[in-house]
Image (cartoon, rainbow, N blue to C red):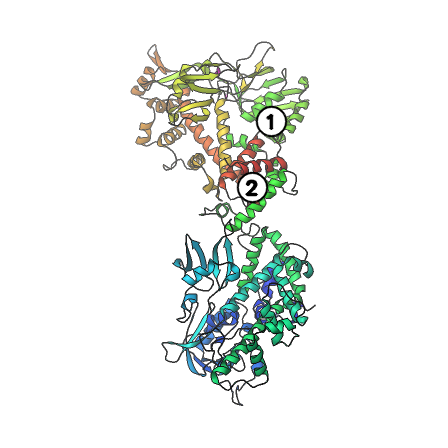
Amino acid sequence: MKKLLSFVLLLFLAGSLAAAEPQSVKLINSTNWNKWIDQTIGYLYESHGCLHFTPTDIYLLAQTVPAGIPLTVKKYKLKETEPDFDPDQVPYLAELTASPQDIKKHALTFKTDVTSIVVYPSLGWLVIMVKGVPYAKLQTLAGPPEDILMQGDFMLTTPTDSGEYKILRTTDHYVSANYYQNTIVPFGAWLKRSGALWLYQKKNAWHKAPANVAADLERPPSQWVYNYYDLNYDSRGKLTAARYAGHDFGKYVLLWTTDGKNHYPEMGYAAGQLVYEQIVLVKELVNLLTLPGPDDLSSVLARDKELQFYKSLRDFKTSGGTKVPADVEPALLREYKLFNGFDLTAEERRALDPRLVKALKEYREKRLPRDKRARREALGLYYYLRNNSLVIDKHAGWYERIKGDWEFFSRLRAALRQDFESFGVLSLANRQNIVEQWLNERLEFKTVAPPSQAKGVAELSFSAFFKPKEEATLFDEREREIMVEKIRKATKGDETGLNLNIVDALNNYNFGVLLNQILGDLYKSHGCLHLSPRNMVFIYDLLPVGSQMKVYKYSESVSREALAAVPYLADLINFQDDFDQLKKRFTVTAEVQVAVYPNSGDWIVYLQKKPFARATVKGGPQTKYYLLQGRDPKGNPIFEPNLAYPTTPGDYVILRKVENYLSNLYRDQTVIPMGGAILKQGKWVFQDREGRWKELPRSIADDLNQPSDRQVYNYFDRAENASGETISVRWGSHPFGRFALQSSLNGRTPWPELIHSSGDLIVEERQLVSDLIGLLTAPRDRLEDCLNPNFELYRACFEFTRNPDRTDLIQPKERAAYRLYFNLPLTDKEKALLPPDAIVASKVARGETINAAEKELLIKEGVAYRRSGNFKVNQEKIIGLRLDLYQYVVAIGKGANHYGVLKEHWAELSGLRQALLKDFNNFVLKDPRLFHDFMRELMLKRNRLERLTQKNAVEILDRMLSDPH
């Protein structure tokens, strides 16, 4: 078996093949496809006197030959001294060309140096001379040596006119006056059906197709007069679009002139039929290179009908005409046998046109008629037989060429198959389109590269992957269809190895740790111990009733070095089974102790007297104060009647566990279970612990009747009617959250200081989870571009805490409160935004002297009094006024913490984002909504401590694909 190397020049392009270049790309780039194609397509077809070239050569001429250079067409009978050089020593122009840069170099040379063209019709050469020296040659087929009249042709076929000319120009769309109806449509132009019309595309405009072309397209393909390719059919099998290949003069035409203005009737081009055959040959190569299955020639041949056809022509030829191919007109086969001297049956001889037999005999016996017209007609009949024979030889030769180079094609098939798997291109149609594009690019001497649109090749980024498009590309649709089918099969167990990156990524990431960090401040209490919602759930379930708990004084602390070795409780619990295993270790009450350090915020759990885990806790304030509830219509402060005080140190036991603790002090807020349903049924009602519907407390009903931005309490899962009115919510402001622990000093009497989270923290954590899901699924790459409005505010808080002098980040009132709390100078505008008593209280807290008016203000508000003529302040209320400012400080600080923690962990969170992006890239699912919803469902599962499985994740994705709503 011959190797491709035996008759194809391999060009290794210096510097163009990187070490990591895929093998298929390397093979395609290193092969001289122009020479292989030119040698394979063979016969250039007779002209009416023009110069015919291969598609490669006319492309090179069109790209390099400048207007104005001399063109000499020699006579058919050359002088003995012509040519005055050895043509065999002149390289082909295509052999001197390996890249677009070489084409530019040729063009520059021909433009700047003295260049001329000489054509030798009888030798079949066009030679480009530079400075009088042969630079390169091209194969050409001139007109026949004498006049011929082809049957059915109204134009005489003549020899190419010798003479001196100049190149006029080249064109990529030649419109012939004689063949206007089939040359007005450019070669390769798209034709599309539009209602009852056929339109053709020229540049960016659509025009009505000529009547002859439109009528041709309405015929069955077997009756088409013109050639078409890239046929598109609708679901009913009706042709809707095609590309035109019926242009007689192909794509590029070289024109010359005698007067410098008008082009000469003769010209140079690749025959439209030849250009079409190159397209067909390329498509055949594409087909045989991409057909699924084994790589041996016999296996490919069994699945490639076109190759079978070319082989049948080869077999017909090599058998002397005894092996008759199907799908070929018998007349052509008879005439081929006649021309090539094969034995004809009696029936075949009777069916032959006697004029053909006579003309062939006269030509070969050199006794053509002397009458001019009769001679021309006889030559026309001979050339008819000759042309048909050459066409059959040509297509029979295609099989021989492919067979002779099968070792190369087999290697290329294997390389393509492997590389396409690596590229992530699974669609056969997409593979074929890519290979076809590669081969066509190589025919223009371009270096090909892995397909940028392939999911395994393109640089993966959110902005590029989710870039809005008017419509999905056909490439993506094909790949997506295959991958969605794989998902479908995986849910049924018919597909294995379909693993989602996001499953392991989310399983390996402990969101509890992040949520505890990002939640930040747990808010001061009235003396209770506050835990994060997540830690509260863990501790509520883990601590057995009767466990010992020691609360230390605010002056006491634990060694930070010793504490560093104790893991956070959330670090120990990533899955529900982790939690279940921990519960088993907390079954012996006597082995469990808790140490609480309110000042440092440390909650330490001991097992068997050894520190086991810790959590962050927030106790009451170090100093007693009255919490400011609000202000009356005149702006006077309204203080809570109950003092907020430091958490009481002592030795406690866990007395009981309480769900939805009911407080007499906060009855309205605690009578509704945390997360309980609230509905508007004429009046507002709520569902109590026993599932009974009751009328909502008046204070909360009044709050719900306010616009949402003026509501005091937190609600979630809000539903509205068509008019935008709230009709249902869930309660989010239970002061003690869902779970609470009651402790006791004596083991019998509940101590008033509870251990709990709060509804506000629970709702805040819910919002953070929602915000995080939005951030992780934002179709952007940089953190700053992924921020939603909430995190934009948090970023503003973050930047403000680093530069409180900036006035462009947060609202003026919040800024003023923050600056006053930290004793930063205030502008008059900022002072005007704050309650006067808050400014005075800050002065008192700092030990500054206040004036008489300020004293009277405090007395009027009940924050100070006179006794025996002496001015006295109520320090608990002064602190309350100060801590009213502290609310803003906490809010700003929490916002800054939200963003700061996010920024700190963005790299690892980006890993989660990238994991899902890789999955969606693999599945070619470019739907940002689906991306968000899928991530949301998986993250909520992980937030519930569920361990994700590949099977469950694929089932979720399949369900979402099946029902996108």
Residue 630 left/right relative to 288: left
Circle 1 residues within 10 Å: few <14, some 14–19, many ≥20: many
Mark closer to the chain start, 1 or 2 = 1
Taking the image as drawn, is residue 45 in sight?
yes
Placement of 36 over or under 69, stated as above or below: above
Q: Position of residue 71 (x, y in %)?
A: 44, 80
- Residue under label 2: 916
Furthest-bottom residue in this view:
80
Q: Position of residue 885 (x, y in %)?
A: 40, 25
- Residue under label 1: 614
Q: Nearer the viewer, residue 417 or 569?
A: 417
Circle 2 residues within 10 Å: few <14, some 14–19, many ≥20: many
Q: Residue at x 53, y 82 (%)?
A: 122
Placement of 2 over or under 83, stated as above or below: above
Check residue 249 for magenta coloring: no
Q: Which residues are magenta?
A: 669-675
